Amino acid sequence: MLRCGCSGFSHLRNGLQGTNLKKLLRTVEALADLGPELTADRDFRQTARTMVAAVMEASGAREAVLFSFGDRPSLLTSVDAQGFTLLPEPSLIPLLPRHIHTLTAAVGPVLLNSSSYDAFLSSNGNVAPELFKCICPLKVRGKLVGVIALGRRQGDGQYEEDALDAFEMLSHYLALGIQNHTLGQTLAQRVTENLRLLASLHSFYDNALEAFATAIDVKHVNIHGHSLRVGRYAQAIGEALGMAPADVASLRSAGYLHDIGKVAVDKRLFGKTSKLDAEESREMRDHTTVGHQIVSQVQFPWPQIPEIVRWHHERGDGSGYPDGLHADEMPQAVRIIALADTFDAMTSERPYRESLPIGAALQELIRMSPQKYDPEAVQALLIQVRRDAVGTNRNPVFEPGSMNLSAVDVDELASTLQHRINNDKKFY
């Protein structure tokens, strides 16, 4: 691993402290860990223990208990509890209709106090509701399936907004886990429900990373929507290349996270209208290695993310950074993200230049292929651009109204690309 400059580490430390990035990464890592847990063929009590531990880690809780909900009779029954010294096994909390209504209507975590305990929980069970400082109803498609309750927080402090956000993010997974566990259906129905569960998990993970990408761009580098667009373009290229759905999902997620190292770069550099000096340029380039260090600490479902984050500024002729790789040393996923990142940079306005029209940006990418950019990836991008131009893309790549090319225009670009490929087969 290459060494980053001291200023890069200083900014990284400031970025981590100022934005709770480390906690966000831990939450994303917990999401990655919980996916396989929920679909594994194992005793649910083991899965429940893992889920509760993940919630405690993300929210900073010292105590937590996971309840499942049954409606015959209406009862919360503990599935796993950690941290509490005196808690019955199982813990039971009967619920009246008004409790069920309040829990079902609640959105996200709820902080409890002396005036709100009775609105959410009955005191007729074998556990006192006053042990809990915060609860989050677990719902699937609007139906109550359980409750996760937190006791005291580490240091006996209050649960703050960042802890509640992490708690809410993980609660969706817990709800799906409880729902899957309690399904009393035939085998065929169970298989169908598990497939829906997996789809829900992938969709929720996507939503979490989209929110994370937005936070990187808006809060740290003020390049609105860049990471989301790179993820979308990379996904489109992968689909046009006929890649497997899992590989396409990996590309999309890598696009969302490719610029995460920019949290370590001084914000003033992104607003500078003149050329960066040597020190500023070095600091900007450090975002690749700083980002690599950040994501290498997280176990993502997609093992290529760290190398994509590190190498997305490499170029086929060896002119890129940080390692000066050539095309045959760059995995296909890296080459795709490099193209998607460059394409969005060209077609987006920057403080030092105007944005290029889509056609002009594509012409420039074709001119630099195959020396700098993978011609197969460029060709796949052209396929998706043409689909947008004729209106046949089920998921359009570009925002409505931004497409200014006709199918004939795209065909001419594709012809130019093919000519370059035929006259220069080799990457330099």
Image (cartoon, helix red, strand yellow):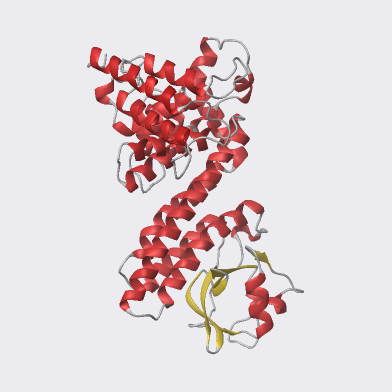
80 vs 309, nearest the viewer? 309
Quick check: 167 left or right of 339?
A: right
Q: Position of residue 243 (x, y in %)?
A: 30, 41
Quick check: 404 left or right of 235?
A: right
> Going 66% across and 54% down the picture, which residue do you hit?
160
Which residue in the rendered view is the most extreme toward the right?
115
Quadrant containing the N terminus in the rendered view: top left
Residue 141 appears in which quarter of the rendering?
bottom right
* Res 31 seen here: yes
138 vs 296, nearest the viewer? 138
Q: Position of residue 115 (x, y in %)?
A: 77, 74
Residue 314 appears in which quarter of the rendering?
top left
Quick check: 66 left or right of 303?
A: right
50 vs 343, nearest the viewer? 343
* Res 60 seen here: no
Q: Is residue 95 above or below residue 358?
A: below
Q: Position of residue 150 (x, y in %)?
A: 59, 67
Residue 123 appears in which quarter of the rendering?
bottom right
Q: Position of residue 235 (x, y in %)?
A: 41, 39
